[in-house]
Amino acid sequence: MAVQMGVMSDDGPGAGFFPLVAGVGLAILSAAWFLRKCISRERRTAEATDLIGVGLQVLALVVFTLLLPVIGFTPAAAALVFATALLVGERRPVVLILLAIALSLGVRALFGLLGATF
Amino acid sequence: MSMTVFEALLQGLLIAMEPQNLVWALIGCILGNVVGILPGLGSAGAIAILLPVTVTLPPTAGIIMLAGLFYGSNYGGTITTVLLNMPGEAASTITALDGVPMARQGRAGAALGISAIGSFAGGTLATVVLAFGANSLAGFGLMMGPAERAALMVFALAMLALLLGDKAIQGMAMAFAGLLIATVGIDPTLGQPRFTFGSTALLDGINFVAAVMGLFGIAEILANLEARMTGKMSETVGPILPTRDDMRRSAMPILRGSIIGTLVGMIPGTNGTLASFISYSAETALSKEPDRFGKGAIEGVAGPETANNAFANANFIPLLALGIPGTASLAILAGGMMMYGLTPGPFLFRDSPDIVWAVIASMFVGNLILLLLNVPLATIWIQILRVPYSILAPVIVLLTLVGSYSLTNSTSSVWITIAFGLIGWQMKKFSLPVAPLVLTMVLGPLLETNIRRALSITNGDYLALMDSPISKVLIVGAVLMIALAFGRSLSRTRHVAMEEE
């Protein structure tokens, strides 16, 4: 793709020159890293991981970003805070609701005071 | 120069002491402290999160605050390290070697006290060097054309390769990835769109700040979730003031740490961890009782803690004098200065002397503020650790996304933040270093512009890039460092392979 942009132009390197250099460099080094991993046969130890939690957190981030222009900042932020707190282990409903309200309003006030618009 | 450094500094001090600037320096120092204490939030991420907020302030106040946050995080990072064996900042890692044993012996207070005192001494010495040395370095910077500047950036990146140690290959791969990401958007000299895939939002390139907020803030949250991090921690401290014997033992380590940290901080592409590591090695080597190290020797806390704060303050020398950010945090700070229309580098002293000198003077004030905050208030800082992670995590997530949104007032930057959050999380999993990626994302466009400008001057003659002695020395040095880094990396691989067979 970088080549299509024109690696060289009339007056020196063209638009594709830098992406080409960076891309080739990345490819070579990645290959070197891969080779090294193969040679040294490092085994990654299995850890207790919570991939579902990570997936749900990413989903919460995506939903927030999609909802933000539709339902406005405060409700979207409250939902995000609620979901995140739930995911990191907060189970008390009162705490979850208070946290969601306080943080969404608080952050809105903080950024609003400093000139941001939503 | 019509004004002497002393007069300029005095005038800067007058501006820095204006109530508004003083308040923002205080806020920056406190935030820096908080960021240093909080696990999962580094100064780079915090500066990135706060950038959109600070651009609403006047430039002097905004930069003073971000600078305070940067060097203030060094003071805070010590607390979690000593008390919980959990470095809040990478540079504090070395402090754990003797700080944690000290805490177990009930001497956490003395460890925290000596760290604050050492940090103050180191920061002050580095700022003196910055005030009196940056100007002459800036004069040197003015003599450098596009070819020399490009050579210097290549040199700084090569130094990074050497210091990455056994992560040289991964680190350089990340550096190239950063360069590639930096090319997204409109080509700087010809105006041709690159890698935009027809998206108008990508024409301006990948928003650097949005990307960094993902790489640090979101990635940390995801990694902690995966490791099921929950709960909270609390401890007691004991008396904060070091004894007379502690002071006597610490005096020389603090002096040496100041010098080491300042020297390392002046070199772009180094980091605070390196400075504190050199200091710790020096103290172990020079000690008459090296056996005490690792078992709670106060010298092992005093030296490295001094060195990493001297490093942070001296880091402003290459940034202000040459326009080269030495660390990820300062790269982001440089991005903030550009948002104000200030280009860090040699012309800054000529074009905006009032702002530069006010920022330098504020660093003296800031270090004093941090000393006054940390010696008596260390016991209070620890209370933050009692905040459960279930409250901290939503705060970090919300601030990150809102900060990202406010960069462009659209969700396009939020998508970038989320995408880079996933990238950062994967990088953590594979222990890929983030710093080279961030550094080249900032240096990339500058490097490209300089190289292409230089090449169009020489009509595309690559060898002519090395015509001047400065470029020659820098490029040869860079090649040697890269060769050395790769040589080491290869021999280590062979070593590992041999051991396993």
Image (cartoon, coloured by chain):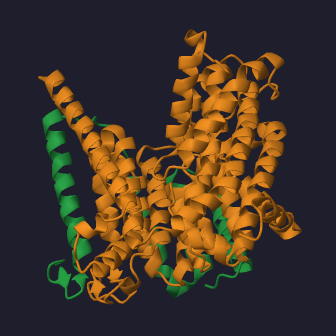
Question: Residue at the spot x=83%, y=68% of the render?
Answer: B15
Q: Nearer the viewer, residue B89 or B168?
A: B168
Q: Quadrant of residue B188?
A: bottom left
Count of labels in the image = 0
Q: Nearer the viewer, residue B482 or B330?
A: B482
Question: Residue at the spot x=56%, y=30% of the render?
Answer: B279
Q: Position of residue B218 (x, y in %)?
A: 47, 60
Residue A46 visible in the current orientation: yes
* Left or right relative to B280: residue B445: left
Q: Nearer the viewer, residue B190 or B471?
A: B471
Rendered-image quadrant of the C terminus of chain B:
top left
Give chain A's shade: green
Question: Residue at the spot x=69%, y=40% of the render?
Answer: B122
Question: Residue at the spot x=33%, y=83% of the render?
Answer: B187
Q: Is residue A57 above or below residue B37?
A: below
Q: Is residue B70 above or below residue B491?
A: below
Q: Position of residue B304 (x, y in %)?
A: 60, 32
Q: Position of residue B384 (x, y in %)?
A: 71, 45
Q: Position of residue B400 (x, y in %)?
A: 55, 66
Residue at far left of view: B501
Q: Nearer the viewer, residue B34 or B448?
A: B448
* Left or right relative to B66: residue A8: left
- Which chain does the orange colour mark? B
Rendered-image quadrant of the N terminus of chain B:
bottom right
Q: Is residue B127 above or below residue B495?
A: below
Q: Quadrant of residue B147?
A: bottom left
Residue A79 visible in the current orientation: no
